[in-house]
């Protein structure tokens, strides 16, 4: 069952969609914002031939970038406005190949502290099977906001 988004969640999701359009890398890679909630973000990717490596599966670097981007947006929702975050560490386990279709990344904040945010991101194949799981640490510092 899909949770209905509140007015505020819809507003934040639209804000993130607009901001992500400014990111050339996100546009190049084809990441799409599905929803953004407090401490959580869900992105999707329609796999293209350019995402695949020589063995016909999505390149691990593409999946790592998707996990990093999704978890970062989740992290932004858990820190005070005016806080900038930067990835300090990313560890990812690839559990099964991603052959194609529409994949989903679900990023969740595990803990938001004053200086660090720890998050996880699960990436699911089109059939719903877990393809990868990442654990990320972000450094947090005052000086930036996702809103202009």
Image (cartoon, rainbow, N blue to C red):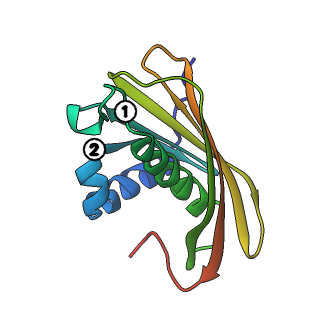
* Image height of 88 relative to 62, above or below: below
**Residue 79 appears in the figure:** no
In the image, farthest residue toward the front: 54
Q: Residues within 10 Å of mark 2 (few under 14, many from 20)?
A: some
**Dot 1 corresponds to which residue?**
58
Residue 118 position by quadrant: bottom right
In the image, farthest residue toward the bottom: 143
Taking the spot 34% from the left edge, 52% from the top edge, the residue there is 17
Percent of width and height locating residue 97: 47, 24
Taking the spot 61% from the left edge, 59% from the top edge, the residue there is 75
Percent of width and height locating residue 93: 62, 37
**Residue 85 appears in the figure:** yes
Percent of width and height locating residue 141: 63, 81
**Dot 2 corresponds to which residue?**
30
Residue 32 position by quadrant: top left
In terms of secondary structure, where does tag 2 sit? loop
Q: Residues within 10 Å of mark 1 (few under 14, many from 20)?
A: many
In terms of secondary structure, where does tag 1 sit? loop
Q: In terms of sequence position, does the residue under pointer 2 or pointer 1 come before the other?
A: 2
Quadrant in which the C terminus appears? bottom left
In the image, farthest residue toward the top: 127
Quadrant in which the N terminus appears? top right
* Numbered disc in front, either 2 or 1: 1
Q: Is residue 118 left or right of residue 2?
A: right
Mark 2 to mark 1 CA distance (whole Å): 13 Å
Q: Is residue 137 left or right of residue 102?
A: right
């Amino acid at each position: 069952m899909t949770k209905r988004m509140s007015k505020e969640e819809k507003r934040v999701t639209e804000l993130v969609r607009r901001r992500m359009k400014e990111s050339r890398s996100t546009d190049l890679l084809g990441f799409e914002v599905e929803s953004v909630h407090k401490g959580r973000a869900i992105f999707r990717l329609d796999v293209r031939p350019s995402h695949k490596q020589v063995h016909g599966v999505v390149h691990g670097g593409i999946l790592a970038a998707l996990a990093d981007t999704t978890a970062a947006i989740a992290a932004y929702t858990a820190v005070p406005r005016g806080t900038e975050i930067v990835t300090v560490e990313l560890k990812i386990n690839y559990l099964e190949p991603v052959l194609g279709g529409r994949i989903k990344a679900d990023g969740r904040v595990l803990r938001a502290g004053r200086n660090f945010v720890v998050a996880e991101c699960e990436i699911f194949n089109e059939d719903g099977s877990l393809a990868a799981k990442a654990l990320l640490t972000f450094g947090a510092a005052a000086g930036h906001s996702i809103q202009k």
